[in-house]
Image (cartoon, grey):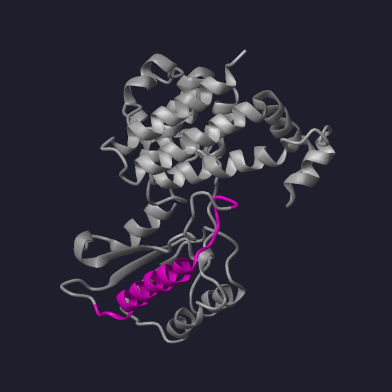
């Protein structure tokens, strides 16, 4: 939907001159912190800087085009303390700028939402789940996919619903005589994979499924989506794993024997059902396995920061393979 909106706003204008895209950065994550989303002092500065760039772009008259289209992603990350300059602009926007604020990163600040409704239009996505997009896109295109073909498309696209629509558009060129398109006809049209949720990585590691874990890691480090305009940096992926194993470490206690006790130890909104799986993994690894896991994580952290001249992707692949091997110990 966003791609379509941008295309409509740009029309036949030169995209390189008329379009400006800014991503509000997520809070800085400290490897070894208490979670993958730990905010440091530089996080606010980075968000304020990105917001300043967006506002400056919005206030700049178009050059050699009729108008400018400024797209700002993940505006849900903007805090109440940082929202002031944006509200000032929304109160008196430049009429030659089409400012598109894309939700994401958290709940949208109410003041921003009110300002948008007063001076613009709120557009809700027609479908956010890839499966919903596939059903609608194939219907609109007059295509029929076999269950296996549909599964192949969804598995390939991951959480990137926009990729599903692009695949269906390509498949529409296949002369199928109205008969269902099977998986063998679909596979040649599946190119770069879409993004996947970060928990797919920890789930694959927990199962000791090295092949799946490495494939998921590759997609996290290389794929993008509407919600994630940039691929994950290796240090971000490492932070996710550090956070996961820190949670397991909390459960390495003989007094914690039930899912309810595990949920209490993990804190937050963790429910006993989710805590049960973490507890089983912690018990399976034991103190020795957890110690080894943190040794692997620490070594990967040092290598990513330049201790040895090893490519970042190789460092992460080695780490994930070693963590999977820990799960496969007998």
The answer to which image quadrant residue 221 occupies is top left
Q: Is residue 323 left or right of residue 50?
A: right
- Is 284 drawn above or below residue 200 in the view shown? above
Q: Nearer the viewer, residue 329 or 24?
A: 329
Q: As rendered, which of 286 and 78 lies closer to the eye?
A: 286
Q: Is residue 253 above or below residue 225?
A: above
| Extreme residue in the left direction | 64
Q: Residue 103's x, y, as percent?
A: 51, 61
Boundaries of the magenta span:
34-61
Q: Which residue is found at the position 55% from the left and 22% from the top?
A: 326
Please name the residue shown 52% across and 58% down the image. 104
Q: Position of residue 12 (x, y in %)?
A: 22, 60
Front one among 122 and 242: 242
Magenta span contains residue 42: yes
Image-based side of 200 in relation to 254, left or right? left
Residue 214 showing in the rendered view: yes
Quadrant into which the C terminus falls: top right
The image quadrant that residue 185 belongs to is top left
Residue 218 seen from this side: no
Q: How many marks?
A: 0
Residue 177: image x %, image y %?
38, 18
Residue that appears at 49% across and 30% down: 154
* Residue 48 at x, y percent in the picture: 42, 74
Q: Is residue 258 above or below residue 247?
A: above
Q: Quadrant of residue 277?
A: top right
Q: Main secondary structure of the magenta part?
A: helix
| Residue depicted at 27% across the width and 73% down the height | 67
Query: Is residue 280 covered in magenta?
Result: no
In the displayed structure, would residue 328 be above or below residue 162?
A: above
């Amino acid at each position: 939907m966003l791609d379509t909106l941008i295309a409509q706003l740009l029309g036949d204008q030169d995209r390189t001159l008329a379009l400006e895209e800014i991503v509000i950065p997520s809070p800085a994550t400290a490897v070894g912190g208490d979670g993958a989303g730990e905010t440091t002092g530089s996080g606010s500065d980075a968000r304020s800087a990105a917001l300043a760039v967006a506002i400056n772009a919005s206030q700049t008259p178009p050059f050699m085009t009729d108008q400018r289209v400024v797209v700002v992603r993940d505006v849900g990350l903007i805090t109440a303390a940082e929202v002031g300059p944006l509200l000032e602009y929304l109160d008196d926007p430049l009429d030659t700028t089409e400012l598109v604020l894309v939700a994401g990163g958290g709940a949208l600040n109410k003041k921003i939402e009110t300002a948008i409704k007063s001076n613009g239009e709120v557009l809700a996505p027609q479908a956010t789940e890839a499966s919903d997009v596939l059903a609608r896109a194939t219907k609109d295109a007059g295509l029929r996919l076999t269950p296996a073909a549909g599964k192949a498309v969804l598995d390939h696209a991951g959480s990137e619903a926009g990729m599903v629509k692009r695949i269906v558009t390509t498949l529409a060129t296949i002369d199928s005589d109205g008969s269902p398109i099977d998986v063998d006809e679909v596979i040649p049209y599946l190119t770069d994979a879409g993004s996947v949720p970060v928990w797919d990585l920890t789930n694959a590691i927990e199962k000791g499924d090295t092949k799946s874990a490495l494939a998921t890691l590759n997609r996290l480090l290389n794929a993008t989506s509407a919600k994630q305009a940039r691929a994950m940096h290796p240090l971000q992926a490492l932070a996710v794993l550090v956070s996961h194993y820190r949670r397991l470490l909390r459960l390495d206690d003989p007094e914690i024997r039930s899912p309810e006790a595990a949920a209490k130890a993990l804190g937050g909104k963790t429910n006993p059902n989710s805590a049960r799986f973490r507890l089983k993994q912690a018990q399976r690894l034991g103190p020795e396995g957890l110690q080894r896991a943190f040794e692997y994580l620490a070594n990967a952290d040092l290598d990513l920061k330049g201790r040895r001249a090893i490519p970042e992707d190789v460092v992460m692949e080695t780490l994930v393979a070693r963590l999977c091997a820990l799960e496969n110990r007998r």
